[in-house]
Image (spheres, grey):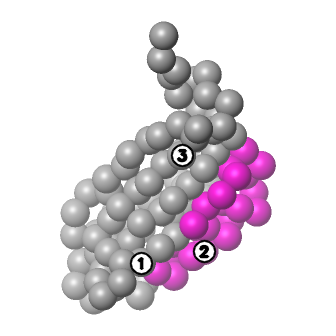
């Protein structure tokens, strides 16, 4: 029987992608840098949280995150810094955030 995200030992990995509205890329970059710092400093269940920007396309961002387990991933969504940041981030985006979840091998 296949593994589910709940019973993986290697953790849960998330890849999120976003595209900003014209002229909003630097504000988005600053917001995501601050968020990454807070996540790494305040969330013990987060093993890695890296924000990247597409080469040649400054309005395209991706977040690569790894959490110890599904509970840590779910707790991440409920943090105060996520609650504060998400409305601001959504206002800067040209398209909805896309997210893929994986389990680490």
The mark found on residue 34 in the picture is 2
Q: Nearer the viewer, residue 8 or 59?
A: 8
Q: Which segment did they paint magenta?
A: 29-50
| Percent position of residue 21, x then y | 24, 78
- Residue 99 vertical position relative to residue 22 in the rendered view, above or below: above
Q: Nearer the viewer, residue 2 or 61?
A: 2
Between the residue at mark 3 and the residue at mark 2, the CA separation in whole angstroms equals 20 Å
| Percent position of residue 62, x then y | 42, 66
Which quadrant would residue 53 be assigned to in this image? Answer: bottom left
Q: Earlier in the sequence, mark 1 or mark 2?
A: 2
**Are dots 1 and 2 in contact, CB under 8 Å?**
no
| Percent position of residue 39, x then y | 66, 59
Image quarter in which the C terminus is found? top right
| Percent position of residue 83, x then y | 53, 53
* Location of mark 3 (residue): 13
Residue 42 in magenta?
Answer: yes
Image point (30%, 88%), residue name: 56
Q: Nearer the viewer, residue 67 or 2?
A: 2
The mark found on residue 53 in the picture is 1
Which quadrant would residue 41 be assigned to in this image? Answer: bottom right
Left or right: 58 in relation to 1:
left
Is label 1 in a helix, a strand or a loop? strand
Is label 3 in a helix, a strand or a loop? strand
Q: Main secondary structure of the magenta part?
A: helix
Can see residue 78?
A: no
- Residue 83 vertical position relative to residue 50 in the rendered view, above or below: above
Which quadrant would residue 22 be assigned to in this image? Answer: bottom left
Image point (57%, 76%), residue name: 33
- Disc 1 packing (10 Å; few <14; some 14–19; many ≥20): some
Between the residue at mark 3 and the residue at mark 1, the CA separation in whole angstroms equals 18 Å
Q: Earlier in the sequence, mark 3 or mark 1?
A: 3
- Disc 3 packing (10 Å; few <14; some 14–19; many ≥20): many
């Amino acid at each position: 029987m296949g593994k589910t995200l709940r019973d993986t030992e290697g953790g849960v990995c998330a890849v999120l992608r976003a595209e900003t509205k014209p002229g909003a890329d630097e504000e988005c970059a600053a917001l995501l840098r601050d968020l990454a710092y807070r996540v790494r400093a305040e969330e013990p269940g987060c093993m890695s949280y890296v924000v990247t920007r597409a080469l040649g396309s400054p309005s395209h961002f991706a977040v690569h995150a790894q959490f110890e387990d599904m509970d840590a991933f779910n707790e991440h969504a409920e943090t105060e810094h996520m609650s504060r940041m998400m409305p601001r981030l959504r206002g800067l985006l040209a398209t909805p955030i896309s997210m893929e979840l994986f389990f680490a091998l």
